[in-house]
Amino acid sequence: MSVVMCRMECRVDGGLSHELPF
Amino acid sequence: MISEQSLPSESAIRPLGLNSGTGPHLQLIDVGEWYALLDPDMMFWALVSKDRDLTRALNEEILPRYAEHAEDMRRELHEFRASERFSAVYFNPTGLCNASCRYCYLPDGLRREGRNMSYDEISKALDNLHAFFESYPGSVMRNRDGRKPVIVFHGSEPLLVKDAIKQAVLDHSDRFVFGVQTNAWHLDDDTADFFMDHKVSVGISLDSPKKEIHDSIRPLRGGEGSMYDRAVHAIEHLDGYKAMSVICTISSMNVHTLPDMIDFLADRKVPSVLMNPVRGTQEVARALRPEDEALIPNFMAAVERAVQRTKEGQRITIADFSNLVLGIVAPMGRRLMCDITPCGGGRCFISVSSDGSIYPCSEFLGLKEWRSESVFTPGGVERAVRSPQLATVRNRWAESIPVCSSCALRNICGAPCPGEVFAEKGSIMNKSPYCNFYEAVIRHAFQLIGRGELPNLVRVDGYDFRYNVFQ
C-alpha cells in the first residue's frame, strides 16, 4: 500500500462517555 | 518591459496551493512507515508511504479527493461539534458505596455518608427527564420518533438500591433503555438474569486479571471478602451477554497487566473493555497516574493482543481505542464523547447526583462549583442544561486551548478531561495530562489503519463508505 484514505458515515444518531460500533 | 514568456507560471508561484491562502491546509505527521497528511478542521486525512513520491500522491490522489469532499466534511464536523445532541443520563440513585477505591472521583465522605433516593424520587426524576427528552430541541432521542434515551445507573454503587432499580426498569422501560455500572458485589445471579431478560446493559469494574492487584486497588469498605471474586463470577455468569462490558481503570498499580487482561477477558467472552487512564479529579488519584514509559507500551501491547484475539475468532475491542479509530475514519460515528471538543458533558449527556443535582458529567460530581439545578423540579433539567455550569463545558473548544490549538490531532484526542484539568489546574482550558499518551496512541491507530486492521477495530458493516482508498 502506498496511499490510504478512508471516510465512513454513521447510519445511526447514537452521547456516551468513557449494537456497538466496535 | 517584462515579456509574458519571462513571467513564472501560477503553478510555480503557488505549487499545489498547499498551506497558503485559500488552498488546502494539510499538516504532515510522522506515523511510522507513513506520513499522515491531515486537516483537523474537517478530519480529512491521507496516509502516504514514505517510499512514495509525495508530489505525485498529492496531485493524483489526495488533492482531487480533498477538493471533492472538503467543504461538506468541514460543515459536517462543525455542526457535529457545535450542536446539542442529548441522548443519555448518568444517574446516581445513591451516594453510598461499599467499595473504597483509591482513585474514585467522588470524595470519600460522600461515598461513606451519602443518601439513597427513594423509589418515588427515582420515578419522579425519570418523569422529568422523559419530559425533557420529549420537548427539548437539542434532544436526539424522542419516544415519538421511536427512540429511547439511555439511563445509566451509576455510582457510587447503584446496586445498593437494586430493588428500586429493578422497579424502575419494570415501570419505565417503555420510555428509556437502561444500563448499570457496578463493582458486582451485589450483582447476584438472579439480578444478573433479570438484567439480561430486560436487556439492561451491564458494566463490570475489573482492574486486573490478578486478584491481589484488583482487591488492593478496589477493596471492600469495612468488611471481609474479595471484590475480584464477585466481579469475575458476574462476568462468567453473564457468559458473553452482548450488552456486557468491563471498565478497567489504568493506574500505576495495574498498568503492567493490561495485555494479560485482554486474554483474561477474551477467555470469558467479554465483547468490549474500556481501558481508561485514571482521572486525576481527586488529588489521591493523581498520585496513581501511570508513567508514560509504562502506560504507552502496555496499552499498545493490549491493543495488539485484542486485534490478535479478534483475528483468532474471539472478538474483543478496547472501546476507547476503537473510538479514537472512529474519530479518524468516521468522526460523526464516534459513540464516546470524551475525545472530541466540546465533549459530551452538558451537550450529549448529563449526570444526576443522589441529591437530585444535575452536573455536566459524573467527573464533576465531586466539584461543587459545577452543580446546577435539581432533577426533581419541573423544568429543572432544561434550566440545568441552560445553566452557566453546563454551558461552560459546552464552550470548551480545543482551538482555544494552549498547545491543542495548533495540534493536528486535536479533533481525535479532545484533550480529556475538563473535570480533571479543572480540579488540577483551576481552569478547564488546559490540555490533557495524558497528552503524550494520546499522541502515541493516535499515531498507533493510524498505523493499524494503514495495516488494514480497520475491520478488527470497528464493525465496518454498520457504516457506509464515502470513500475508501487502499492502494
Image (spheres, coloured by chain):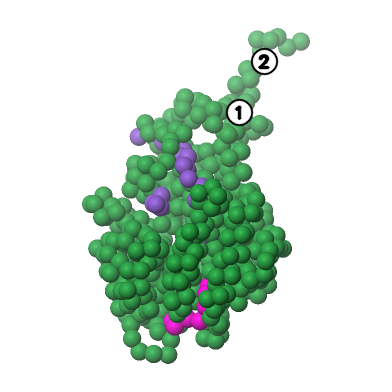
Chain colours: A purple, B green
Residue B282 location (% of width, % of height): 56, 76
Magenta stretch prevailing secondary structure: loop
Mark with earlier residue (2, 1): 2
The image quadrant that residue B281 belongs to is bottom right
Position of B418 compared to B210: left or right? right
Q: Which residues are magenta?
A: B92-99
Which residue is depicted at the point 56% across and 52% down? B142
Image height of B176 relative to B289, above or below = above
Pointer 1: residues within 10 angstroms few (<14), some, or many (20+)?
some
Circle 2 residue:
B7
Residue at 62% across / 44% down in the picture? B79
User: Which residue is the site of mark 1?
Assistant: B17
Q: Does residue B253 show up? A: no
Q: Amino acid at mark 2?
A: Leu
Left or right: residue B124 versus residue B447 is right
Q: Nearer the viewer, mark 2 or mark 1?
A: 1
Along the viewing direction, whichever of B98 and B66 lies nearer the viewer: B98
Quarter of the figure that contains the C terminus of chain B = top left
> Position of B357 compared to B106: left or right?
right
**Mark 1 residue element:** helix
> Residue B307 location in percent, x, y?
31, 52
